[in-house]
Every structure is written in structure tokens, then in C-alpha cells.
Image (cartoon, rainbow, N blue to C red):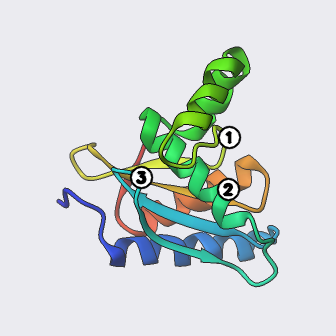
Amino acid sequence: MTDRLTLAQARTLIDVALSTARQHGFKPMGVVVVDAAAQLVASAREDGASALRLDIALGKAGAAVGMGTNSRALAARAKDLPAFFGAVASTAQQPFIPQTGAVLITNGAGVVIGAAGASGGTGDEDEQIVIAGIAAAGLGHA
């Protein structure tokens, strides 16, 4: 069991996430993996993906780690508390985008060791590909 996210795991996650996006015919994606401190471990932007894809994916992953929950839950909360989430986004030291498309990564003991975020498709598509990548890397998700 690992207590931290490795570069090899992050690269596997990204490769499988992007492969999954191609298998489903999704638009070109950007995928980011961060550690438990929301620091970048690895990222990749597919050919044809727009310039902001990695920035958006990083903001989703940073929000998930920063708030300790997946970005789908954050997006739902942001609808009820727009002023609070706007304030967090403007004061956070890390990019913070509370939109569906990022999932917490856990180790075998269920401890959060990072997050993966994607951008390029719908929030559901983004979430689907990072979950596939997390599983392929032998990790769990929350």
C-alpha cells in the first residue's frame, strides 16, 4: 500500500484516461494529477485540446483536494453557496474550480493521496475518464 502518489501511477492514470476518452469519441482532453497538497504530479493535453484545458483540470483537482471531496459534490454545493465558493476561489493559493470532472484518489486504506481532474468534455465525461485512469493505476477513488 502506498502512502503517496507516484509519478508512475500518475502517468498510468493519464494514459488510460486519455485512451478512454478516445475509445468513447470524446473531445480532446486535458488531464491533471495532483498530490494530497494539490501540487502537480503530472499532466497531459491531447492534440487539438484548447489552451485552457490543463488550467481548468488543475482547478478542478485543486478544489477537490482542498475541500476533501470530489468536484461533483462541490458543484452541487456551489449552487447553494455562490458567494462562499467565489470567495474561496479568489483567496485560495491553488486554482479552485468547483465543477464536475475531478475525483479524489485514495490508497488501499482509503486515505486521500491526491486527485485527478480532466477538462474537455462534459463534466460526466471528464469524471468518467479519470475514474478509469485511477482504477488502471491500482488506486481507489472517493
Q: Amino acid at mark 1?
A: Gln
Q: From the top left corner, tell me how far across and down residue 142 is, in percent.
A: 43, 41
Residue type pointed to by label 3: Ala
Which label sits on residue 99? 1
| Figure quadrant of residue 73 | top right
**Which label's residue is closer to the chain start, 2 or 1?**
2
Residue identifier under label 2: 56
Q: Is residue 89 left or right of residue 22?
A: left
Q: CA distance from mark 2 to mark 3?
A: 14 Å
In the displayed structure, 33 sits above or below 108; it is below
User: Which corner quadrant holds the N terminus?
Assistant: bottom left
Disc 2 or disc 1, which is closer to the eye?
2
SS label for mark 3? loop
Q: Residue at x 19, y 61 (%)?
A: 2
- Counting residues from the start of the chain, the first of labels 2 and 3 encountered is 3
Task: Identify residue type, mark 2.
Answer: Ile
Secondary structure found at label 2: helix
Q: Residues within 10 Å of mark 1 (few under 14, many from 20)?
A: many
Within 10 Å of disc 3 (Cα), the crowding (few <14, some 14-19, many 20+) is many
Could you say whether the residue bearing mark 1 is in a helix, strand or loop? loop
For disc 3, the marked residue is 38
Question: Residue 62: percent from the left, percent from the top?
Answer: 50, 48
Location of residue 75 with respect to 133 vertically, above or below? above
- Residue at 54% across, 62% down: 132
Question: Which numbered tag is attached to residue 9?
Answer: none
| Residues marked 2 and 1 touching at CB (< 8 Å) | yes
